[in-house]
Amino acid sequence: MKASLMVRLHDAVREEEIHRLELEVAELAQGLNVEARLDESSRETLPKIEVKGEDCEVLVKILDKKWGVAPASLSEVKVNRKLKGLVTGRWEGEEGLLIDVGIRDPKRVDAVYSSPLIEAQLGDGQGLPVGKILEHFCLFEDVPVETTVIQVRGEEVKVSLSGRQVDLLWSLDSTPNHKLIVTQCLENRLRKVLCDRWMERNVLKMFPLSLNVHLVHCAFGVDGDQVKARMEKALGCPVYSFRPSMRRRLGVVTYSPIV
């Protein structure tokens, strides 16, 4: 069984990302009667994997739950199907978002998350411009999201965010501490930076969202922008700041990081 994983590889650190992916796949396959091999010759941004053995379908389901497995072709994409994807950028057709859900056959097709749906799911009735909503929830390039297919018409696929994804974004918005989204960075590199004493005082915890995308929780009351600046300097990777709206509604005061 061959499949593409919904993890975006980057040329500058491709070998390091593939090595880390191989280790994680091997760990997930422990105890299963399978042989899994990544296609290192492929230059696709999404890594290809071949799985053989009695438990191959079990491992593919595990991989799909962890990172997402791309549909084999556009013909497999049906309304109401849940697809994990990666934000690609803004949709120029209207003020919306393009999401790579792994469709490559017969050609690459990015799904469209349209502005009316963005406003309905994330706008909170505040009448904010769609760009501001996307910026607020850190829906930038490489950020992973779970989607639900709502329409397939020819080679156009439209999606909404899944209920689980919407709940996650609003739960992040409901707590007053600042969060950061770190992209294009493997977990071991980020953890090394977080071991710095200054970071230990100003960061609560981190969670991997994908192989190379992570959510970092700043300590309560700490201004995330200063943590962001120091993290960008140390890592050289894109870091995005998530400032919860509760901070504005309740007038929560932020302080300079603890020195």
Image (tube, rainbow, N blue to C red):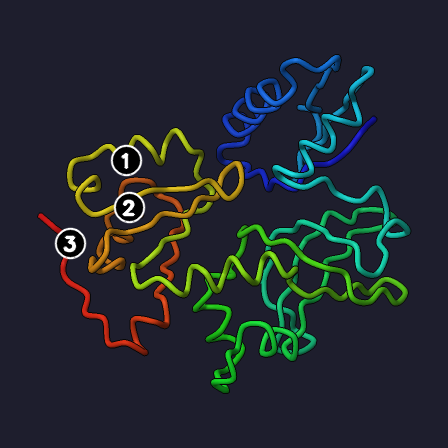
Label count reads 3
The span from disc 3 to disc 1 (Cα, nearest Å) is 16 Å
* In-image side of 155 versus 140 (left or right): right
Q: Nearer the viewer, mark 2 or mark 3?
A: 3
Dot 2 alpha-carbon crowd within 10 angstroms: few under 14, some 14 to 19, many 20 or more: many
Question: Along the polypeptide, which appears first: circle 2 or circle 3?
Answer: 2
Residue 193: image tag: 1
Figure check: 15 above or below 193? above
Disc 1 secondary structure class: helix
What is the three-letter code of the residue carrying label 2? Met
Amino acid type, callout 1 = Val
Can you identify the residue that label 2 sits on?
231
**Res 224 → quadrant:** bottom left
Q: Earlier in the sequence, mark 3 or mark 1?
A: 1
Q: Residue at point 67% right, 68% down?
A: 113
- Depth check: 163 or 148 in front? 163
Q: Are marks 2 and 1 in contact (CB under 8 Å)?
A: yes
Which residue type does callout 3 highlight? Pro
Camera-nearest label, 3 or 1:
3
Give the x, y percent position of residue 2: 80, 29
Residue sitting at x 57%, y 27%: 21
- The residue nearer to you, when weighing 39 against 149, is 149
Up-down relation of residue 163 to residue 85 (above or below): below
Mark 3, residue position: 257
The location of residue 159, given as percent across then percent down, is 72, 64
First in residue order: circle 2 vs circle 1:
1
Quadrant assignment, res 173: bottom left
Residue at the left extreme, as displayed: 259
Q: Secondary structure at mark 2?
A: helix
